Amino acid sequence: AAVLGLESSCDETAAAVLRADGSILAEAVLSQLAEHSPYGGVVPEIAARAHLDHLPRLVAQVMAEAGLDYPRLAGVAATAGPGLIGGLIVGSSLGKGIALAHGLPFVAVNHLEAHALTATLPGLVPDPIRFPYLLMLLSGGHCQCVAVEEVGRYRRLGTTLDDAVGEAFDKSAKLLGLPWPGGPALERLATRGDPARIPLPRPLLGRAGCDFSWSGLKTAVAHAVARSAGTGQDRADIAAAFQASVAAVLADRARHALDMLPGATALVVAGGVAANQGVRAALAGAAAQRGLPLVAPPIRLCTDNAVMVAWAGIERLRRGLTDEVGHAPRPRWPLEAMAAPAAAA
Ligand code: ATP
Ligand code: MG
Ligand code: FE
């Protein structure tokens, strides 16, 4: 049995087919970078139309690659929130249509749950990770420490008081004159920089709890850029200092969060910022200080993809958690509002 997963919540159009044991039969991701870059950010209407243009073709492609006909699927899982409503409607409507046409169960997947469960995909790490684990969700729209207690059972330990960490990367990159999306470009620039020459603040470092605040750091980047002569080296040094600050703060917050979840078996990172090598190294250090492994999915599974959506669908189907075709996509959908297996029984 296999499950088809669809992702269309932001600017990645993606489809994947996974066997119930988690093995990946086919996966495809189409980034809409070219469509949005003239605007310096994701334009919701353009995103929705691009999903409409590309998703049906990607679905046909992964089904062909998997060598499956629709009736042989065990279910269809589509991201139904949180995210941009136009894209959510495109993906979940297509998913429901396929499910209805072939009499298959439909699963409305929470995008954050999909990020959260990626680390439990079999074969990702030698020893399968067990609940509970600490998830740091570090993406373009979110910055949270979450206790993952079970599929469907999440407890938020800390969150950002202002910007998401990916947003901080993107805004700081823009201030440094880098093209959108800024995260990867800033990381490349930082490799040539000296993080100690133009030090930047480390917001909330050492403070109790595991909340985050990034807007002050972004403002400090703006001041540093304005004060500098603007040479290539200045920009590289500011990028390096920014990344060092973010990494140090994330490590500090991770240590605090792990202390708030004494039974944690691992520190797991997810979301696009988890692709950053400086961030990964700092978090690995924090986890090691608490005697725990850091589990970081491969980069293509950290950023938006449909493998994680299909896997979340498989985990929910296994527990009998399916959704009606009348299920409405939700632009806002916090993890704590998930239907836990116990609540569904
Ligand atoms: P959400 O999952 O919260 O809805 P999203 O889907 O837009 O948001 P992701 O696709 O998970 O977020 O991540 C995108 C973010 O990750 C962007 O802000 C991008 O700049 C950042 N990012 C990607 N690669 C890197 C990197 N190497 N270093 C730092 N940041 C990165
Ligand atoms: Mg994206
Ligand atoms: Fe995401």
Image (cartoon, rainbow, N blue to C red):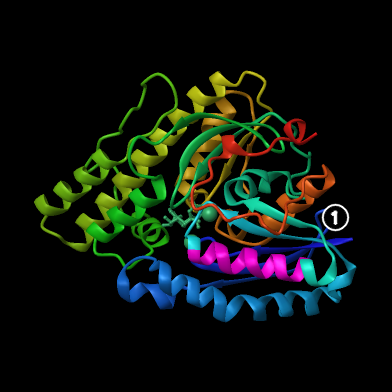
Tag 1 secondary structure: loop
Q: Nearer the viewer, residue 199 or 77?
A: 77
Residue identified by numbered label 1: 20
* Residue 90 falls within the magenta-colored stretch: yes
The answer, for residue 275, to whether it is visible in the render is no
Disc count in the image? 1
- Tell me the kind of residue under disc 1: Ala
**Residue 81 visible in the snapshot:** yes
* Residue 293: x %, y % from top left: 65, 34
> Where does the magenta region start and end?
86-99
Q: Is residue 268 left or right of residue 157?
A: right
Q: Magenta stretch: residue 205 in it?
A: no
Residue at left offset 39%, top offset 66%: 42
Task: Name the main secondary structure of what is drawn in magenta.
Answer: helix
Residue depicted at x 80% and y 72%: 101
At a point 66% along the width and 52% down the height, the residue shown is 109
